[in-house]
């Protein structure tokens, strides 16, 4: 035998319990698992009936320790940690994660297949399987501008790789259930004809009833978005497999899972893990959170090992049993869920004193990956909103005919005062939802006075050099103190997003992001207060994770100092441009109602006291 683990509390997957066992490992696989109760007394030592047959020079004393299968995360994005696979692997293996299924749709939105292949060519200690991005861009091309588009040709090319096990989260509900042939339907058809079992992953927040049934009938049978006590029952009753991330692990949701015994159709996942949070844990942290919310440890382990592996047809792992991959984790206790040792293919790759896995290699991407931010520098005038710029948009609102009287034409210059009813994205304190509300703001000297109304302004600059689009949206419950945030790490198309309540700081933050070729910047009082450089495609750092984490921690601290309140302020800001995340979001082509995919005007109605001045 290559290795024997003696007298450990070993997780028994099919009964979801622990028993004292000995484990034999050879050739990277489990050879045998023998109960300690089989031992018989010897004059010198206890010798098990089968343990005595295992000759080895390598013995691990598992007395008092818990041994579980390696953790399996089947819905996550490496790019959400703003790093690349090799560095990501070094970070997560010490937390007991030995297998992930990564959906690289962030790098795909920037560089297409080339971006995905640049990730897939990296060698890692971690086993990384892949989901092919189904939605690049996430919505219709007339709703946002992305760096790349993904079609059947790219899908067929990637399906040839055995590491591809699923079609990544299908987001475009309307495209999937529309009449006739559509891109989403063709993707599902290609996957069904590829000769392998390819899972179809979904993204369907808020879908229920007939819409949900239509989504499932089309072939999508999994969802990873935020669940409620009601949605988790409806979706599992309809046959969906649910992947619970942090924002779904509420006490009432866990209680439903326990009471209705839904464990067979659920897995725990991370989805997105920020670099600074990654330093503190990964899937092990989600397991710990599930336990804190009331889930028994044995059940939480089941949902982080066996059910995810089974979902993705990874039948060689997720269980400690003869013939399976010897990926396993040694825990000193179940409460903290912090590994003492991690074994990959039967070899010890991490112990409690280790700082990481292997030697870090400086990753170098193709040169053009470092010069992808091609938008212009912002000016102060970009954040001053003349009323005249929004009359045309307002005229398209047929429900507001009274707003059309007195609209400017020709060379008229408006010197207007009054009020405007505007559509606003309202930030929530938990999750990424931006509620659609309307507010009244003053109009003075022909401009929308958004600052006087206590709102922040968001602007999205198209950053690929394709059309130069700029669009605007108002945001409530964002920054309370004067300042701004700018980033190219803005889901999913990663255009350049600016949010602020100070024009000076908004210009400064946007300009700094352009100069850095991507990243996250905060500005306040006319100076840059924090910055995290993401020069690879505007979304990935080439620094070590500890260095990157320190930069992101500083950015997070500045955003929170400026009064932004959310359980994850960075993700909340970065998803203001995510057109598949409820309810009202902003792209480079305007604001959109997520459910209907209908464009929403910035200004809903004007109440103007007119004082027209006509230029001669």
Image (cartoon, helix red, strand yellow):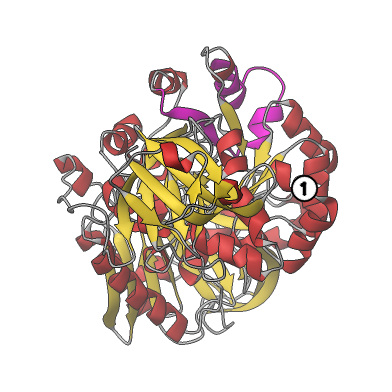
User: Tag 1, which secondary structure?
Assistant: loop
Q: Residue at x 59, y 16 (%)?
A: 192
Up-down: is 593 above or below 424? above
The quarter holding residue 425 reads bottom right
Q: Residue at x 43, y 41 (%)?
A: 52
In what quadrant of the picture does the C terminus appear? bottom left
The quarter holding residue 604 reads bottom right
Counting every numbered tag in the picture gives 1
Residue furthest front in the image: 43
Q: Residue at x 52, y 65 (%)?
A: 572
Q: Is residue 197 magenta?
A: no
Which residue is identified by label 1?
262
In what quadrant of the picture does the N terminus appear? top left
Residue 179: x and y in percent read: 72, 21
Q: Left or right of 579: which side holds 488?
A: left
Q: Left or right of 65: which side holds 427?
A: right
Residues shaded magenta? 162-190
Crowd class of label 1 (few under 14; some 14 to 19; many from 20; radius 10 Å)? some
Up-down: is 434 above or below 192? below
Q: Left or right of 259: which side holds 555?
A: left
**Of residues 341 and 144, which is closer to you in this image?**
341
Residue 589: x and y in percent read: 49, 48
Residue 215: x and y in percent read: 73, 33
The quarter holding residue 555 reads bottom left
Q: Is residue 176 magenta?
A: yes
Say whether residue 265 is visible: yes
Residue 580: x and y in percent read: 59, 48
Say whether residue 577 is visible: no
């Amino acid at each position: 035998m290559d290795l024997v683990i003696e007298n450990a509390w070993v997780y028994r997957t099919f009964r979801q319990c622990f028993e004292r066992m000995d484990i034999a490992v050879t050739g990277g696989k489990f050879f045998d698992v023998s109960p300690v109760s089989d031992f018989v007394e010897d004059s010198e030592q206890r010798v098990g009936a089968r343990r005595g047959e295992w000759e080895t020079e390598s013995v691990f004393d598992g007395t008092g320790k818990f041994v579980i299968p390696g953790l399996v995360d089947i819905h996550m994005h490496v790019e959400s940690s703003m790093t690349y696979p090799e560095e990501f692997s070094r970070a997560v293996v010490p937390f007991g994660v030995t297998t992930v299924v990564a959906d690289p749709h962030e790098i795909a939105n920037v560089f297409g297949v080339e971006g995905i292949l640049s990730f897939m060519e990296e060698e890692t200690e971690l086993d990384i399987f892949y989901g092919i991005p189904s939605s690049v861009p996430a919505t219709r091309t007339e709703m946002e501008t992305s760096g790349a588009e993904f079609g059947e040709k790219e899908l067929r090319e990637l399906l040839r790789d055995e590491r591809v096990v699923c079609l990544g989260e299908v987001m475009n509900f309307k495209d999937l259930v529309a009449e006739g042939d559509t891109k989403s339907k063709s993707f599902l058809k290609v996957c069904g004809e590829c000769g392998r079992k390819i899972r179809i992953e979904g993204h369907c927040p808020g879908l229920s009833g007939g819409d949900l049934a239509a989504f499932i009938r089309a072939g999508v049978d999994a969802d990873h978005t935020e669940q409620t006590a009601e949605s988790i029952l409806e979706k599992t009753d309809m046959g969906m497999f649910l992947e619970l991330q942090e924002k779904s692990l509420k006490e009432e949701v866990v209680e439903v899972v326990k009471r209705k015994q839904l464990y067979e159709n659920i897995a725990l996942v991370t989805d997105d893990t920020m670099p600074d949070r990654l330093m503190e844990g990964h899937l092990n942290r989600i397991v710990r959170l599930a336990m804190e919310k009331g889930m028994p440890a044995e059940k939480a382990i089941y949902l982080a090992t066996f059910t995810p592996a089974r979902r993705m047809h990874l039948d060689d792992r997720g269980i400690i049993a003869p013939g399976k991959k010897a990926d396993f984790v040694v825990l000193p206790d179940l409460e903290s869920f912090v590994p003492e040792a991690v074994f990959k293919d039967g070899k010890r790759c991490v112990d409690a004193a280790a700082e990481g896995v292997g030697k870090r290699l400086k990753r170098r991407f193709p040169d053009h990956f470092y010069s992808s931010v091609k938008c212009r520098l912002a000016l102060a005038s970009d954040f001053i909103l003349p009323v005249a710029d929004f009359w045309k948009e307002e005229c398209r609102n047929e429900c507001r005919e009274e707003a059309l009287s007195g609209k400017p034409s020709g060379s008229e210059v408006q010197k207007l005062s009054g009020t405007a009813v505007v559509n606003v994205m309202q930030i929530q304190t938990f999750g990424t939802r931006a509620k659609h509300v309307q507010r009244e703001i003053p109009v003075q000297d022909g401009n929308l006075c958004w600052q006087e109304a206590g709102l922040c302004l968001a602007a999205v600059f198209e950053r690929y050099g394709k059309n130069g689009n700029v669009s605007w949206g108002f945001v409530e419950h964002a920054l309370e103190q004067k300042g701004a945030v700018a980033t190219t790490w803005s889901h999913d198309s990663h255009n350049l997003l600016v949010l602020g309540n100070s024009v000076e700081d908004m210009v400064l933050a946007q300009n700094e992001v352009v100069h850095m070729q991507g990243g996250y910047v905060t500005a306040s009082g006319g100076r840059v207060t924090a910055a995290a450089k993401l020069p690879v495609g505007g979304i990935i750092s080439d620094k070590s994770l500890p260095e990157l984490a320190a930069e992101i921690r500083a950015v997070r601290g500045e955003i929170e100092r400026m009064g932004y309140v959310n359980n994850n302020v960075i993700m909340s800001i970065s998803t203001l441009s995510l057109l598949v995340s409820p309810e009202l979001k902003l792209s480079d082509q305007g604001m959109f109602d997520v459910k209907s995919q209908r464009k929403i005007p910035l200004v809903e109605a004007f109440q103007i006291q007119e004082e027209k001045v006509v230029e001669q």
